[in-house]
Image: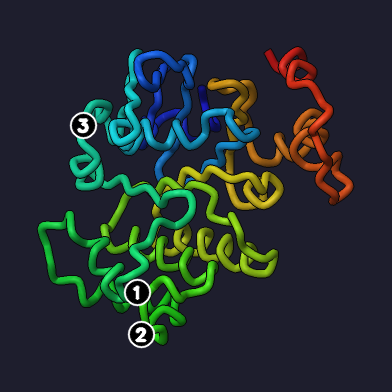
Amino acid sequence: MAIAAETEAAPPLLSVNNIEVVYNEVILVLRGLSLEVPQGQIIALLGANGAGKSTTLKAISGLLKTEDGEITRGSVSFAGETISGMDPGQIVRKGVFQVMEGRRIIQDMTAHENLRLGAFSRKDRNISADLDMVYDYFPRLKERTGLAGYLSGGEQQMLAIGRALMARPKLILMDEPSMGLSPLLVKEVFGIIRKLNQDLGITILLVEQNARMALQTASYGYIMENGKVVLDGTAEALRNNEDVKEFYLGGGEGQRRSFKDIKSYRRRKRWL
């Protein structure tokens, strides 16, 4: 899939090529999924709960193995090299870092210790400049000297992002960064995501339930249903798409709808 005319000349930083993912050798979750992430861009991956978004990130980062999952078909390439099948540690050293859903910080360590842990995979252990950079972006973390478990939800999310920065990643996979945060903190976190992309040139693949905020932040988006991509386009085109408005943006009226009584085949019939 082509992202935009100006990016066609250069190969994407990340390429997911027609992958299938199976859990426990039985449960098929991803069904021939393909997407591309150009260098230096923020790309959104949207979809309902259970669509396979988090599984996609784990397939890229190598974390499927921790949950008895595997890629049974297709491949994942990063910077022109196939990384599917590599251990998660190898993938981190290549420059890919996943910020997990729910933050996953180590609560009985301090914020400072969590940040130092983020640099564990680096050969260069001179991390003082990186710590200063993280504290410049997240000054509240420098003020918090107690255990990370006592941080607020927003501060824990900042710590999770800061820990990713300590690995000096080329690509950050972000899984639901707005989960559990107040609307004010959601705006703050997404502002930080944009700033990291603009200031540091870090490429970001963003999985997010808040479709409106994601499409305001990203340049391009993919929408998943039942383990595969059913729609993709520029963020502007998706914001203006009638199906996206109806099922993900609340019909454009600023209020998210309840979809409990809406059959998924209604949108699949139009998209597939």
Cβ atoms under marks 3 and 2 closer than 8 Å: no
Measured as percent of width and height from the top left, residue 259 is found at: 80, 34
Contact flag, marks 1 and 2 (Cβ < 8 Å): yes
Looking at the image, can residue 141 be seen? yes
Tell me the CA gap for discs 3 and 1. Answer: 29 Å
Q: Which residue is mark 1?
A: 111
Q: Position of residue 53 (x, y in %)?
A: 52, 34
Which residue corresponds to the image point at 21% horizontal and 31% vertical from the top-left?
86
Which amino acid does the dot numbered 2 rest on? Answer: Thr
**Is 241 above or below relative to 143?**
above
Q: Earlier in the sequence, mark 1 or mark 2?
A: 1
Nearer the camera: disc 3 or disc 1 = 1
Give the mark, 3 or 2, whose residue is nearer the N terminus: 3
Residue at figure coordinates x 74%, y 38% from the top left = 248
Q: 180 or 208: which is nearer to us?
A: 180
Q: Classify 10 Å Cα crowding around label 3: few (below 14), some (14-19), many (20 and above).
A: few
- Locate residue 4: give its quadrant: top right
The 10 Å Cα crowd at callout 1, few under 14, some 14 to 19, many 20 or more, is: many
- Residue 91 — which label? none
The residue indicated by pointer 2 is 145
At mark 1, the secondary structure is helix
Tell me the kind of residue under disc 3: Met
Instruction: Tell which of 68 and 168 is nearer to you.
Output: 68
